[in-house]
Image (cartoon, rainbow, N blue to C red):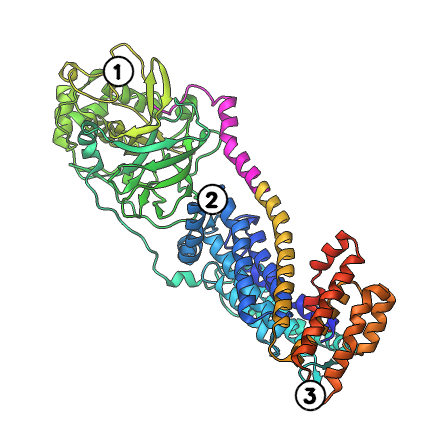
Amino acid sequence: MKQQVFLGQVSAAGLLLTVASLFYSRVFGGPGWVGPVIGAVLVSAAIAVFLGRTGMSRWLRGLALVVAGVLFVGLTVIVPGTNFGSASEITTAFLGATVDGWRNSLAATLPIDTGLPEPLGFITSIAWIVGAATGILVARSERTASPVIPPVIFAALSLPLAAPTGIAAYFLIAALVGSALLLALVRAVPQAQISGPARERVTEFVGERMLSERLIGGAPILLVLALLTPLIAWILPFDNDEPFDPRQLREEEVVTASAVNPLAEIKAKREAVESAFLLTLPAAPNPNLFDRLPLVSLETYDGANWSTTSTYSATSADITPEIEVSEQNSLAVRQQIEILNEPSPWLPAGQPVTRIEGNDVWYDEVSGSLLDRTDGSPRTYTIESRIVVPLPEELREARVDNTDPRYTELPSIPSDSPITELSARISGANQYDTLVALQDFLRDEHTLVIDEASGTSIGRVERFLTDREGYRDQFVSAFAIAARQKQLPTRITVGYRIVQDNDGNPTFLDTVTTDQYDAWPEVLFEGIGWVSFDPVPTTFGDAGVNGDDATEVPVGQPAPQGPTPTSSDPTEDDQLDDDEPEVSATVRLLVVSGLFLLVFPLLLAFMVVLAKVLRRRYRANLDDPTDRVLAGWQESKDRLLEAGIDVRPDMTVKEIVSASRKELGVHASSSLSALAPYVTTTIYSERNPGEAAADQVWTEVGTFDRQLSESRTRMQNVKAKVDPRPLLERV
């Protein structure tokens, strides 16, 4: 095949693969997918074309492509996504990318984040397979349209994830159709084979003129055909802004969790002290701003118990919470959590969650809570949260958000109930001051008694308000009910306190135990989010002096009251610490990219050398002496190509020897001259050569290699070994 025609096919195939990859632009968020996905189809196609033009066996080509694909996916997706983790983490990421990647792609909220190995690793793997298949078909298939099939299938696979929308979709479809037709046109250039014994070896193609004429005449037709399909779609009476999306046909997978009332478990958990989880904060914030990790939020109250109506589904790594929190009144916190003994189905995490790094972690977008989808065994995951830390002045100016009636609904409560009386007597200059007055009244005028029975029914809360003493769940329930009576949207959150007081110096706990299990009410403010309050006293009354509780503080000693509201803005040091994970991630990405740019060319060079060695061994061990003689001559011609000597298929043996003597000198080409009689006899003699002749030919081949190597510098020898031309050209 003429080199120009073949390069035209390769270029057209690269264009088609690139256009097919662009169908995934709406699937992923940001440009992070471009390198792995488009790089995979183009690099694998180039390697496949390279290997397809060699004499390498089919199985060996497949193995080389698999090894190169694993290295490519590992360097571009897996290693950056696992933060240079252990070998087991990288292996797990590979398995996740191959086994769970497509399922996670279908379940994830668009756009899919590119920071995790799943599902970017899976789609990159598919891209590698598609590019490899296209390259092999371009190099070895004689069917005109066969290389078009893999890229078109690859583009179609993106449709269940995200169908293209708007006017850009029509241009994208036109580009796909046009590039596919262009590749078919270039491959349709006719060819004629010489008949006779040399039919399999000699092929004559039409020249560049025929190819140019085909392209000049066919380009306008291709343009019309490419624009015809999107034009028809444009004029059809359908909603152009909402194209067909196959994901709409599948049922969204959601789960609900059945568990013991988490609010009723507070007393039992705090009495049976056990390790719950290990907490690591890579850039620890101020403990006064972040002192708790929620498990689950309870928004429904039936007059007896608080419960949740949350539903959970798989999601992408990056999350956009239903209630957005501005950066001005919030603090980004990264948490690494290892569960030790937490039998509940929920996972602790600061809220609202903005990023999840872990497998089988499902998310409820309304409450923001996380669900553990494993079998309950110990597990590790990483969470990034945007913690609300507004100033009191901001809260006094803000209004509560009453758009969701679930946070204000209550059962019927008598007008003479102590709860109604409490709600009526508490007031303030604004909604926030009213909530603070309610918090202070419960905390200052009521006694925390740890041996008091739990219970959150209306009757139990009324007795608590009458007796002015009770347990933790009564304090938070009374606050939530009274606030809801004033139409202030309130929920109860159950979770863990993660800060301990060391002589007035609050510090984070490394190991969080069940005696840190607690509950607190939260109120929803417009433009701010959920704000926590603490109506539970920090000291115990006489009835609880002999009790055991993790938050017991001697009378007169202050204790932190929670992250909101704050009395000041976060310090500059806190903000710098908060930026450290992003800086570290950027550095890791640059390091990995640099390693990839260094390692991948070395890998390609190694593959070239390996292919040459294996092909030489294969040629030297052919069974037929005739094949071995001709293979030895071909091996020597490969060395001439590496030396830059123009060796063409139409040259005779004598002409090749003459050209080598002129370029290399008499000494370097003497063994090649000794080879010529054996080759000429093999081609034209009626008798086949014997084993001795074949062995002598390969002896001369080795001598020629040695003489050629001695005539060149060390650097020239290295360049010759990694020169891919002998693998690409048949001479």
Q: Is residue 228 visible?
A: no
Q: Image quadrant of residue 307? A: top left
**Residue that label 3 marks:** 197
- Of the pair 501 and 567, the residue shown nearer to us: 501
- Disc 2/disc 3 C-alpha distance (Å): 58 Å
Label 2: state its secondary structure.
loop
- Residue at 33% of width from left, 27% of height from top? 498
Q: Which badge, 2 or 3, is on the more N-terminal residue?
A: 2
Can residue 60 be seen from the camera position used here?
yes
Q: Indicate the position of residue 569 as horizontal and vertical percent values.
A: 47, 22
Q: Which residue is mark 2?
A: 82
Measure the C-alpha gap from mark 2 to mark 1.
42 Å
Front-lying residue, 366 or 549: 549
Please state the horizontal and vertical placement of residue 111, each as a whole percent of the image. 48, 51
Amino acid type at image mark 3: Pro
Crowding at dot 3, Cα within 10 Å, few <14 / some 14-19 / many 20+, comes out as few
Q: Which residue is mark 1?
A: 553
532 versus 198 height, above or below: above
Where are the magenta residues, as a range? 562-590
Question: What kind of residue is marked 2?
Answer: Thr
